Amino acid sequence: MVAILVRLAEPFLSRRGSVVFALVGISLYTVLVGADASVVRAALMGSIYLIANRWLGRPNFAFASLFLAGFVMTMIRPFTLWDVGFQLSFAATLSLMLYADPLTQWVRRGLERWLEREWVEKVMGVLSEAVILTIAAQILTLPLMIGYFGQLSLISLLANALILPVQPAVMIWGGLATLTGLVLPAVGQLFAWVAWLFLGYTVWMVRLFAAVPGAAIPLSVSATGVVAIFGAIGALTWLGKQPPEQRSRIFAAVRQNISQRLAVGASGVTAVLVLSWGMSQPDGQLHIVFMNVGQGDATFIQTPSGRQILVDGGLYPSVLNDQLGRQMPFWDKEIDMLVATHPDADHVSGLVGVFDRYRVNQLITNGQSFGESPIYDEVLTAAENQEAEIRPVQAGEIIQIEDGLRLEVVHPGPALIEENRNENSVSMRLVYGEFTFLFTGDAEEMGEAEMLAAERPLTALVFKAGHHGSNSSSSLPFLQAVQPQIIIVSAGVDNRFGHPAPEMLERAAAVRAVVLRTDELGSITVNTDGTTMSWQAEPLP
């Protein structure tokens, strides 16, 4: 968008005049879309790029200004550093600074081999705004997009080439409609109709490309993988900036050693794969991992025979996929059972990404169907598309997972509680040998009261605290019935809800239970062979 604004102004204004025009356009767009934090950050980054590169003609100053802006933003709000919008804005601006000019020169040299100079300029005029700068901006944002959203768009370049050229018209006519409408509403409405034509085209194109089969492919990678991609990009960037003679020497050195290194590397990779396969084989124990997914719930269970069960998925698909990647070997793409305890986003949003990456054989629900929440509808639709068995469960059912291991459903009953959908969470008791584990989702006092009234077995050595350890869950009568020795609390670091609640911790102390928290310990793994038990924690990053 920055490039298009500059391009529009260049035939009529000086270099600095076109920068002023673009800055005004950016400011107007920021106001029109509501000026929320992410838009302001992107506008600031784009403005820095314009002033430093186009106005001052000092790319080095641009880098210093960009990092100064990032430093100031994170000083004011330290958690901005972990904001996806901030990371994408920063990466896109840095990517433009690093790659826009080299990529433009590379394309120009290629065209000059085939076209006359006059045609080269015409083609470059189209490519620079529609394709080249889009590619340049995506070089450093692509790893983040894959890491956070778990997919790679195959048609974004074509879509941008057809959509971006009309965005200045949207801003100009929309701005005129807004300003004129304050004084002359009829004229403002006329301008708004013109803006609507371009907006309608934009929406139509977005829907058209979104409906293309295979428009995006699942390509989830772990956080370590994202870092590795950035490392590779950095190495290639450094190599590209070396003089041709130096690059030739580097390539010659690589070719000289590649044969023996390839042999050693192949042997090492083979050994690692064999070792990984051996380590991933079932060890005859039950492993339960209360995964650190921030302010949400996600529990991974590996049975003694190697079956894999996932209970809820937290809020973010990328975080869940990263955690699952740590628990499952990379070649294993099957989850035997998925339990969606209830439709709340902090329990089921992450599950959408699971269906993109894994084959799910069975989905356990509390019986609630479509219409509870948009994200829950997505989960149900994804399960149907995979032809997974969707199994609603009720209290009293027993699911025999394998010999010696069963799930006892203790909630909800036949009649769901209308007042609060948390109260309808699938609650179940996992029994293996002498050890029992109790999961209650977000069930609160009403749900716990129903479980107590049903007089079904509730005792559990390990209890996953309901509703992230809130004061409305884990009542004293319920804890006295469960008699846990260990209570697991899944909560985000410094979460705004104050979970776990001090009152809940006092009740846990009253029943002499040890409280283990993911916000303090990271992911917590409990291992048992049915007669003995151990646990360990994966430290927070």
Image (cartoon, rainbow, N blue to C red):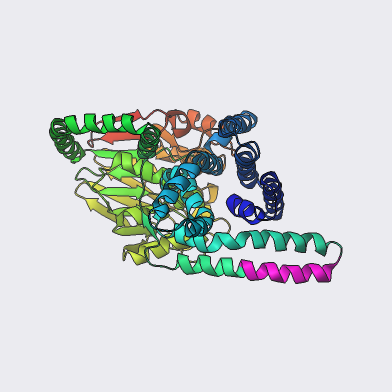
x, y percentage for residue 167? 61, 60
At a point 54% along the width and 39% down the height, the residue shown is 90
Tell me if I can see residue 418 in this picture.
Answer: no
Find the magenta span and give its range: 184-199
Tell me if I can see residue 265 in this picture.
Answer: yes
x, y percentage for residue 518? 44, 34
Query: What is the chief secondary structure element of the magenta stretch?
Result: helix
At a point 17% along the width and 38% down the height, the residue shown is 273
Residue 535 shown left or right of residue 482 in the figure: left
Assess whether residue 40 is covered by the magenta stretch.
no
x, y percentage for residue 132? 48, 51
Query: Along the line of sight, which residue is nearer the eye, 26 or 378?
Result: 26
Query: Along the line of sight, which residue is nearer the eye, 143 or 129?
Result: 129
Residue 539 shown left or right of residue 197 in the figure: left
Residue 377 shown left or right of residue 270 in the figure: right
Residue sitting at the far right: 183
Quarter holding the C terminus is top left
Q: Quadrant of residue 262?
A: top left
Residue 221 shown left or right of residue 70 in the figure: left
x, y percentage for residue 497? 59, 39
